[in-house]
Image (tube, rainbow, N blue to C red):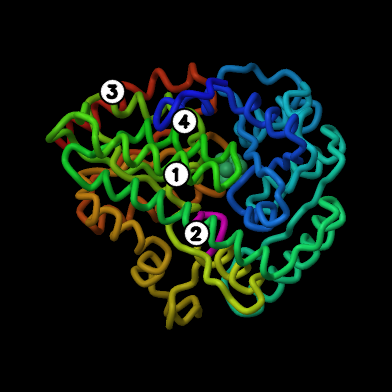
Amino acid sequence: MSEDSRGLARARDIYDNREQRAKEFKQGGKKVVGYMCIYPPLEMLTALDLVPYRVFGDMREAITEADRGLPVAFCPFVRSCLDLGMKGEFGFLDGMVATHSCDAIEKTAHVWEHAVSHPYFHFIEIPTKVNARAEEVFKGELEAFKKTLEAFAEHELTSEKLKKAIGIHNEQRALVRELYGLRKADPPVISGSETLVVLKALMSVPADEGNELLKEVLAEVKARENPLKKDAPRLLVWGSIVDDVSLIELIENAGSNVVVDDTCVGSRAFWKDVRVTDDPLDGLAHHYLADIKCARTFFEAEGSDRGEATKDYALDLESRFGYLKEMAEGWHVDGVILQSVKYCDTHGFDVPDVRNYVTSLGLPSTYLEHDYTEGSLAPLKTRVQGFLEMIG
Ligand code: SF4
């Protein structure tokens, strides 16, 4: 990988050669630990000088091995990840941390443990509701994770180290929010596809290196002549995994600007900071359970009586998706693209409610589904063009 590239070029370099960068860390004597979703607290890896490396699939690689471990009618993203794992593509990983983010990842994690072996493997259970008892249970899971991680890293994970790591990751969250803030302008200062390249690069390198990259990108995009379209429809993209720029490029090349997103390689992991608490595991347990707004967690409306007869649907929607209103207003959104990979029940079940909610905000929306192959994106082009014509 080129030593000289900086800013956006550097991010693209890492995006295109993720494994190579991870292998460079290994050659430098570091241990690289994989994870498949935004739920493992990366602060705990950073505090022990382990390199977190997010595992992604490959839309261009045919799935030929994973069918030995997973059903065909199953999330194609995790099938692709497992397929690459079974083909030895993640042989450089020293360990893997999996979470019960959704049932598809949970099942895949247990197959992965046996079909793709690494020196270290740990599975973290996560409650699906947010309340005091759930946070306590989740903190217990993080305590168990801490023990196995310490044994693997052969170092103690002290509160001081963990608080310092939380500071580094909070700095990253603030820098990402600053980058998103630049997309409020018309035209946005950085496109949706460029942002995805940067965020995927962040998920391939240690947090402090990611922070330096973000500072370079911020300085570059603020200073450059803006190449983006003015007065184009401004879109919010919501939904399941988007780990390849081709979908966002398709949407933007159809004549729009993707100005903000609610996806798990996008804003979701960065929208709120982790509170630094006396016992840092308290702050981490709260953040990863309550602050991350993913469809896998149910957010009960405050003050809502859960009795069937009195359940308040509008209150429910506001409680679960109110943050989308802030995004829509703050980023002057004209329309919403709901998108998901096929067989993602986690997001699929939320689509009607998100749609009802954005409709209540006066925003038009459309729903796109694909099977996580490059070929399945092509037919979506006409749908996007039709949607953009509709919203003018
Ligand atoms: S795309 Fe859906 S089913 Fe697949 S890993 Fe993500 S949340 Fe789970």
Q: Is residue 272 left or right of residue 95?
A: left
Q: Which residue is mark 2?
A: 170
Dividing the picture into quadrants, the one containing residue 381 is: top left
- Give the class, few, some or many, for how many residues have Cα within 10 Å of label 3's Cα (few <14, many ≥20): few
| Pointer 1 residue Cβ closer than 8 Å to ligand 1 | no
The magenta region covers: 292-298
In the image, 90: left or right of 202? right
Mark number for residue 266? 1
The residue positioned 12% from the left and 35% from the top of the image is 231
Report, in whole angstroms, how far the alpha carbon at label 4 lies from the one at label 3.
Answer: 21 Å
Considering only order in the chain, which callout, 3 or 4, is on the residue closer to the N terminus? 4
First in residue order: circle 2 vs circle 3: 2
Which label number is shown at residue 253?
A: 3
Q: Amino acid at mark 3?
A: Asn
Identify the residue at image location x=57%, y=71%.
130
Q: Secondary structure at mark 2?
A: helix
What residue would you read off at disc 4?
11
Nearest the eye: 234 or 373: 234
215 vs 94, left or right, is left
Where does the image place residue 150, in percent across and percent down from the top left?
Answer: 82, 58
| Sequence order check, earlier mark of 1 and 2 | 2
User: What's under tag 2, amino acid-wise?
Assistant: Asn
Is mark 3 in CB contact (under 8 Å) with mark 1?
no
Determine the residue positioned at 16% across, 33% down: 232
